[in-house]
Amino acid sequence: MHELLTTDDMYEADQLAIKGGIAGIELMENAGRAIAEHIVKNYDRGQVAVLCGPGNNGGDGFVVARLLEQQGWPVTLFLLGAPSALKGDAAAMAQLWVGSVEQLDENSGAGADLIVDAIFGAGLGRAIEGELASLINKINGSKVPVIGVDVPSGVDGSSGGVRGVAFRAERSVTFCRKKPGHVLMPGRAHCGKVAVVDIGISNEIIAGLKVKQFENTLELWHPHFPRLTLQSHKYSRGATVVVCGPAAMTGAARLAARGALRAGSGVVTVASPPSAVMVNACQLTAIMVKKFKDAAALNGLLNEDERIGAVVIGPGAGRGNTTRNNVRAVLDAGVSTVLDADALTSFEQCPQALFAAIAENCERDVVMTPHQGEFEHLFTDIANLPGCRLEQARQAAKSSGAIIVYKGVDSVIAAPDGRAAINTNAPPTLATAGSGDVLAGIIAGLMAQTMPAFYAACAGVWLHGQVATLFGPGLIAEDIPELLPKVLRELD
């Protein structure tokens, strides 16, 4: 159930179901019935205003109105346009409605206890303006709960973008699978609590679509998660190296190292320039410290131990030529790598040089973890193109050859082959200094245990969010590694 269906995917699924013997009108009846049942289950009986549009979303609304009225709910139905203009299944459902049909205007729904938004749904292709925009703004300003049919009108189901204005629904009821617009901002903020209901489209049909975007749920990556055996030892659990920067900037590297250790990496080392060795040695116990003096020495340190499974570079590394050289040394060593923070900003003026270095070492996986500002500087052309974060992350992964973790409340994890996952469990408390350093370490720690890089990135982002949710207010970066074991226990 973690697939996310674009509007095109959903249209294809509908058509395949119809070709398989389920009539379109049956799918519409099933959708309306599921919404009506959801309303009856979650709300007290009261005056309902059903706002219908001219397409199939409106047809769903006619079904909802009919079924609620049959159960004794007082219903008023409003239609955008004339009933005679309805076509196909929507027209057929309108004929089954025995009540009056009111014209939809900016005052529709006044006095209702509950509003069902069945105006446009996921496939809206233009901005909402004029009288309809006034209606939406008026309802949003009231305290009347709104149920969105599929997605709230005004939200683009494929991108999460808001076209002009959009309803702010208390709940949305969608069909078969969630859509990207349910989980990408700003659409996610308009959808409220999302319920996914079965309307008769089989899992086999969804599997045949070969969908490449997913909600980042436990089920997506858990089959690939590292597992211990009786024969496990510290090196079989993976060795991780975190590259540190100058003495004044060592804290970030230690946070990343702690994240890797708590994620299960059996051996973690902080590689330190001479000025940082004593600072790190005084702060670390289970984590080792090794010295390197320059990029060549760093490359040698990584090559001398074939057991090293992953490297993190960037947290507290410092911006500039030294970090650029160290990044090249790490990539040249042919070890799976997480590039974060200064490892990204140091290439802002020459991103193609970084992408070329990644391409030269394509036998190893590279994960890049930019937040929005870093993304915009490193992928300027992509960030300036129209499109949602999902498509921007995909393009960045393809152009760089790296797995991209585009961080935010709706973090997107994208691979060069087009696979992408959208995360939904990250609370705003993660907006604290150092939390991204810990995330980089968690991902590297999982990669060191030979977890495939895309799934390691998905798992790391999910675990990061789950820890923060569990901890609650007051979270600081140091708390994240220490609470990680509790979340890991719950996985088992």
Image: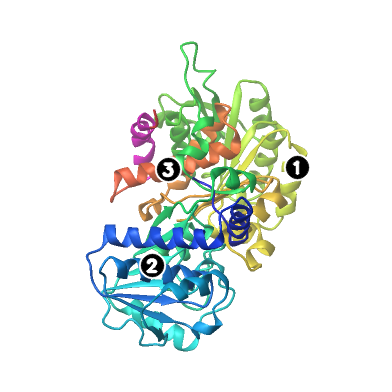
Which callout, 2 or 1, points to the residue nearer the camera? 2
Please say which color scheme the image uses. Answer: rainbow
Q: Quadrant of residue 323?
A: top right
- Looking at marks 3 and 1 on the same chain, the residue that comes earlier in the sequence is marked by 1
Residue 285 can be seen, yes or no: yes
Q: Position of residue 337 (x, y in %)?
A: 62, 37
Question: Residue 359 — which label?
Answer: 1
| Amino acid found under the numbered disc labelled 1 | Ala
Q: Nearer the viewer, residue 436 or 313?
A: 436
Q: Is residue 429 left or right of residue 385?
A: left
Which callout, 3 or 2, points to the residue nearer the camera? 2
* Residue at x 58%, y 42% (from the top left corner): 204
Residue 447 position (above or below residue 153): above
Kindly check if marks 3 and 1 are in contact, taking CB atoms under 8 A apart as contact.
Answer: no
Stretch of the chain drawn in magenta: 476-490
3D distance between C-alphas at marks 3 and 1: 29 Å
